[in-house]
Image (spheres, rainbow, N blue to C red):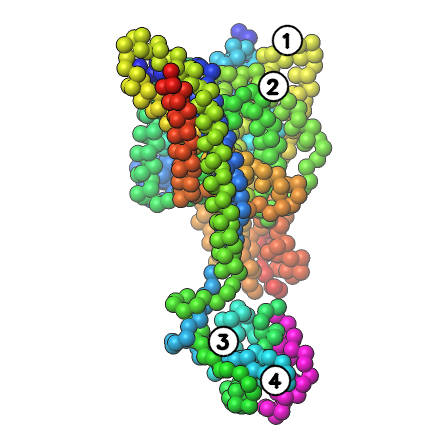
Amino acid sequence: MFSYILRSIYRGSGNIRAYILTMAMLGAILLMILYAPAGYLEEVLEVVPRPSVSISDHPPGIEVYYGYFDVDGSELLVISSRNTSEVLRLLIGRDVRVSNLSIGCEVDNPGVKRFLEDVVGGSVEELECMGNFIDYAVIVDQEAFQWIAGHCTGKVHTMYLRGYVDDGVTAPSAYTLARDLLGVVGLHQGLLYVSSAVLISVICLILGFRASNDIKRMLVWLSEMHIPMGKTFFYVCLVYLGATIVGVFAGYGLANLVVPLMLILLKLFFKIPYIYAGLDIGTIMILVPISLISFLSYILAVSWMVFRG
Amino acid sequence: MREKLILVVILVFAVFAVLSPWLVNEAPYIGDAWIHLKKSEDIIAQGKLRFEEYNDMWPLVNLIIAFYSMVLDLPPLMATQIIPFLVSLSTINLYIISSRISRNSYAAFSTCMALILTPLYTFITFGSAVMKETAAFYMATLLIAYLLIGRPSLVCFLLLSFGLVVGHHFASLALFILLLSVLAEDISDMLGGDAPYLKRDLVMASVFSVSLFSWGFFVLSRVGWFLPVSGNTLLIAMFAWFGVYVVSRMGRFSSVGLQALLIPLAALAWRGHLHDIPTPVSPTSIWEVRDLIIFMVPALAGLAFFWKDRIVRAMLVSTTTLIVFSLISGLDHSGLIVFTKSLHYYCVFLALIFGLSWSLILRKRFGKVFLILASICLVLASIFGIGLALNGPGAYHDVEYVQLEGLRDKLGEPLVMDLKLYYLSEYLGVGRSIFHKLGQGEYVLLTRSNLVHGVLLDYVWVDLSLYMPYHVMFSCDRLFDGGYLRVLRVNNV
């Protein structure tokens, strides 16, 4: 009976092939919408080096003193440590040569420079521009830091920098930025996910109404053969559940075919770099709930049409 | 009589095409030849097979060379040419496949000629090589032809399957995907109410899968993961199969559309325009485009006409999946390896649909004129490939072999060389290291192709000046210059 139902549905007007194709198309579109931006950001996470530094308020680690002090009318970030070079290497990822009194290239207040020269009794060395917070900060030795802390308004803070990721606060980096962006995209993904689920369910509902005539006719034939309707209906459900699963897989296939080929064409014609994050096994599950909802909508429509009489 | 004549013509073309590197250069093509030559000599000397490293795990090529060397009493070096000869015989398999589908001997003839003279020139550059892939190629095409037999012998199929499985992993994978595609066709037929081949195909697929996975597990237990792709990428391959199957089942238009996109992409990738590789790439000429179009149009027409044939569709799905998978698995070096291997099977399918179209085109008014034009273009298109096979970075010359053998005992220091010479040196037992940043006093071994094409590094080649800029080259001491081979000592880096 199972194979008879299978063939009848396959040959009918609301047939399995159309159902599988619809599921596949919708699944593929959904995957493309959901995964195009997320895929890029996942790739960014792969490319950007993970931070190898953490900040804590307790040892172990390199002790760093810092504070915002009011110097000649402007608030200035002052940093000090026993091992300033290592601190800078950890914070900005570069080896920077610093003297006893170094000042960032964006601190252009002449009053500040004069004040600092008075403190150390020597000249202030201006650091090259790095495009980060160091450009706005002053790096001094510990003796000078204590003098500034004693004579200027501001609070001294202490932190411990470690050359590995442990507890404490992870220093901001391109990696964390990409991860945060992924989180933002995740919110949009959720919204898209819900709206797509609703849309696909409605489409499957319509499909179910369309296919119900065939199924009704088949149920009549089978009831004439004295085969219980419940059993037949169970088989019909089974056939369409199978079709849903095949449709979902085909959807993954279409998404995996269309997206990379489009990216290759973009690379070829517009020189846009080819970055393709293929769907991994973890993302397979994303379509399953939607498919089940769609399948239930489909069966609901068929049941409604059949049992209404 | 006509059919026999056609077969003789095909065989003559195929044999001359794949044996041309040997006939012209008197040396095997592609460095893998030296590895397998060494392995075969070991088998002959020791009288036993060893399973110790990657190249031992698919012993078909080594066994064939050893077998023919012993039976025909040929030197093993000459016996290596049995592998290209077997590849030339695969055109007969393709003739059987095409004639079974089209029932037309002209179509079958065109199919074989299209394979030999494909504008993607894979037949000559791949078929001339002595390697695992080529040894398995004959078995793969034979198994495809075997699928068309109404009542195949299970014992025969089992033997053929085992032969392919111990031939090469990628060839086995290609056939496995083909069998899956055939089964998908059967299931589709079953839904339509008539599936005459389902049981037979199910048995064949089961037998082949058991052979494939048994051998695969054996290999994994010996050498570990050997594929240039990860498990996750194989999952993508499965999805790609689903996607290609859906597009190919939707209708003629979608199938032809996908191929119309893929054939130029494959040609561009083959010419080095897609992958991120350091090989210098020359721009594609208008003539190459013309040849490709002349090849594509009948091929797409053939696909449209024979789209409903289950074997054509199964081959379409399986070979297209391989090509798509190779492209989506990454446009990097490992992607290039998968692409190169996939293209050989894709070209078999392209040759098939190209040949099939002629059973219909020849009935048209200017069919014969178009056939002559297409034949001329195919010959012209394959010239580039012939040039690569004869003088490309992978082509050896007997002079290189003789000169390096003569140098072997005179060398006290290891030589720096590219992969092409590395294989030969490994065979001859010459001290060697692969090209790296050169140091003072190092000895460099160069061959003529290094100066013309560049330095061969795995699947890519780079300009020699990358390792030896002109000032380094000119300041070197020339210790040996034999026309082909040169030994230089680096003085100024």
Compared to A86, does B445 lie above or below? above
Mark 2, residue position: B301
Q: Residue at x 41, y 75 (%)?
A: A57
In-front residue for pair B93/A195: A195
Compared to B192, does B32 lie above or below? below
Q: Residue at x 61, y 64 (%)?
A: B493
User: Looking at the image, do the residues carrying marks 3 and 1 touch, with CB atoms under 8 Å apart?
Assistant: no
Tag 3 subunit: A
**Is residue A53 visible to the viewer in this orientation of the structure?**
yes
Image quarter hosting the C terminus of chain A: top left
Mark 3, residue position: A86
Question: Is B242 inside the magenta-drawn segment?
Answer: no
Three-letter code, disc 3: Glu
Q: What number is the disc on residue A226?
A: none
Q: Earlier in the sequence, mark 1 or mark 2?
A: 2
Q: CA distance from mark 3 to mark 1?
A: 82 Å
Front tag of 4 and 1: 4
Three-letter code, disc 4: Val
Front tag of 4 and 3: 4
Q: CA distance from mark 4 to mark 3?
A: 26 Å
Q: CA distance from mark 4 to mark 2?
A: 81 Å
Q: CA distance from mark 4 to mark 1?
A: 94 Å
Do discs 1 and 2 share a chain? Answer: yes
Decide if residue B100 is on the left or right side of residue B281: left
User: Looking at the image, do the residues carrying marks 1 and 2 touch, with CB atoms under 8 Å apart?
Assistant: no
Compared to B342, does A175 lie above or below? below
Mark 1, residue position: B363
Q: CA distance from mark 1 to mark 2?
A: 14 Å
Task: Say what secondary structure mark 2 lies in.
Answer: helix
- Tell me the crowding category of disc 1: few under 14, some 14 to 19, or many 20 or more residues within 10 angstroms, Cα based: few
Q: What number is the disc on residue A71?
A: 4
Q: Which residues are magenta?
A: A103-130
